Image (spheres, rainbow, N blue to C red):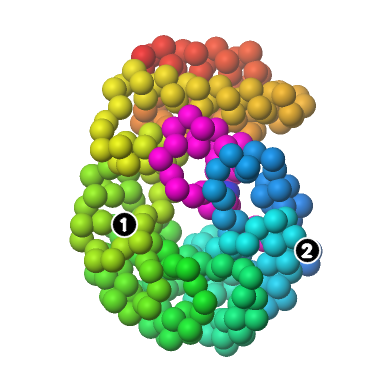
Amino acid sequence: MQGYTEAVWRHYHSRIFGGADRYFTPFVRCEHGAPRPRDIKDISSHLNCGCQVTPQIIFRDEQEFRTLTEAVTEAGYTDIDLNLGCPFTPQVRKGRGAGMLVRHDVLCRIRDLMISMPDVTFSLKMRPGIDDRHQWRDIMDTVNSMPLAHVTIHPRISSAGYSGEPDLDIFRQMTAALRHPVIYNGDLRTPDDITRITAQTDNLKGVMIGRGLLSAPWLAREWRCGTTLPHDKRLTLLKQLHDSIYRHYRDTLCGDSQILSKIKPFWEYLEPTIGHKAYKAIGKAPSLARYETATAAAFDSIG
């Protein structure tokens, strides 16, 4: 997730909470015909060594696909995830992300390029369509002919973004039509949500958690262990996660403004946990001193 699950977050989450088998990076994309430097810096960070990481790429044509694949493999990876699900309108309009779902001719050529790269393990994340829940049918034969380790399905059309309920009927139809192992993604916020979707779907390879893990960093660990952490233990680990990330940014970045711009997104999905008042105080903090006061108050209020 862009701006949230970067290398520092992945590293410390895996060390402090754990529970996830693998982390998928925010998508790597081209900018002015070349891989965006900050994306390459993220996947090349030494912090990736502490956990299993798969870079994700987003592309609009064969040239971008080739450029990004070469950059990712040169960074030392042999696993690459293809983004056919991003609903961000500017990307979709340019044919990237979910925009690729209606570009069958391009996907066929991408498929041929993938087949020519036997040393790379590919996977793919997709939605049912852009503005029609049945658009996936037009590309399913091509997806099935791709050399894929798995397909992750987020069962909302792109135009819906993240609003409304996931379309589980379409998810089941897509799963039945796919020849590849399937991973479910969408609105997994509690261990019960994960248990429910795994019980409803035969031969499900796994689940991918995005916003749910940002709002409840303990989610994967609790589901895997089958136990709910006590409230005070959750908060202790949450504070460790925050403090580790904050300390990293203070040690590696310069100036209050730059550090605050990197650490404040940590709280965006945690507002229900710390409360609106504490969240607003953190968001308005103009300096590191005021930020530290606001975060201390937030932890005290929920402790």
Outermost residue on the front side: it is: 119
Residue 90, placed above or below residue 243: below
Q: Is residue 140 left or right of residue 265?
A: left
Residue 143 falls inside the magenta stretch? no
Q: Quadrant of the C terminus?
A: top left
Residue 19 falls inside the magenta stretch? yes
* Residue 164 tag number: 1
Q: Quadrant of residue 184?
A: bottom left
Q: Which residue lies at the image location 63% right of the left edge and 13% below the top edge?
A: 289
Span shown in magenta: 3-31
Q: Position of residue 20 (x, y in %)?
A: 43, 44
Q: Quadrant of residue 50?
A: top right
Q: What secondary structure is marked by label 1?
A: loop
Q: Which residue lies at the image location 38% right of the left edge and 34% below the top edge?
A: 218
Residue 136, placed above or below residue 284: below
Tag nearer the camera, 1 or 2: 2
* Residue 16 tag number: none
Q: Position of residue 14 (x, y in %)?
A: 50, 37
Q: Is residue 274 left or right of residue 194?
A: right
Inspect the image, locate mark 2, and give the three-letter code of the amino acid beneath it: Ala
Disc 2 target residue: 34
Q: Is residue 49 left or right of residue 37?
A: left
Q: Which residue lies at the image location 47% right of the left edge and 68% below the top edge?
A: 149
Going from the N terminus, do you reach mark 1 or mark 2 first? Answer: 2
Q: What secondary structure is marked by label 2?
A: strand
Q: Quadrant of residue 58?
A: bottom right
Q: Position of residue 10 (x, y in %)?
A: 55, 40
Inspect the image, locate mark 1, and give the three-letter code of the amino acid beneath it: Gly
Label 1 Cα crowd, 10 Å radius (few <14 / some 14-19 / many 20+): few
Residue at mark 1 to residue at mark 2: CA–CA distance: 36 Å
Q: Which residue lies at the image location 21% right of the left edge and 57% below the top edge?
A: 199
Q: Position of residue 59 (x, y in %)?
A: 63, 69
